[in-house]
Amino acid sequence: MITDRTAPAESVTLTAEVENLVDSAEPDAVFRDTRECGGGLLLLGLLLISPPTPRPKTDAR
C-alpha cells in the first residue's frame, strides 16, 4: 500500500479502511456460483419476454 507521508492521519486511516474493504473476502463465506446467477438471469429473461396472459373476450354486439 502506498502511503503519502504528508497526508493527515485521518485520511491515512480512511485510506487503510477503504483498502481493507476493497480487498476483503465475501462476508460470511457466501460465494455466488456463476451457473446459478446465469440460470437466474435466463429465467428472468424468459419471464420478461413471455407473452402476456390472455384477457377474457368481451361480447361486442
Image (tube, rainbow, N blue to C red):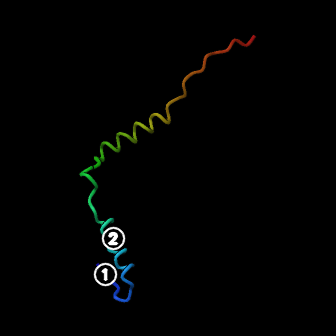
The numbered disc on residue 2 is 1
The image shows residue 61, relative to residue 15, as above or below, that is: above
| Image coordinates for residue 39, horizontal then vertical, percent | 35, 40
In the picture as drawn, the residue positioned furthest to the right comes out as: 61
The image shows residue 19, relative to residue 44, as above or below, that is: below
Ranked by sequence position, the earlier of labels 1 and 2 is 1
Q: Which amino acid does label 1 sit on?
A: Ile
Q: Gap between marks 1 and 2, in whole Å? A: 13 Å
Characterize the local packing of mark 2: few (<14), some (14-19) or many (20 or more) Cα atoms within 10 angstroms.
few
Contact flag, marks 1 and 2 (Cβ < 8 Å) = no
Label 2 SS: helix
Q: Which amino acid does label 2 sit on?
A: Glu
Quarter of the image with the C terminus in it:
top right
In the image: residue 60, left or right of residue 14: right
7 or 56: nearer the viewer: 7
The image shows residue 31, relative to residue 14, as above or below, that is: above
The image shows residue 20, relative to residue 49, as above or below, that is: below
Residue 2: quarter of image = bottom left
Mark 2, residue position? 17
The numbered disc on residue 16 is none
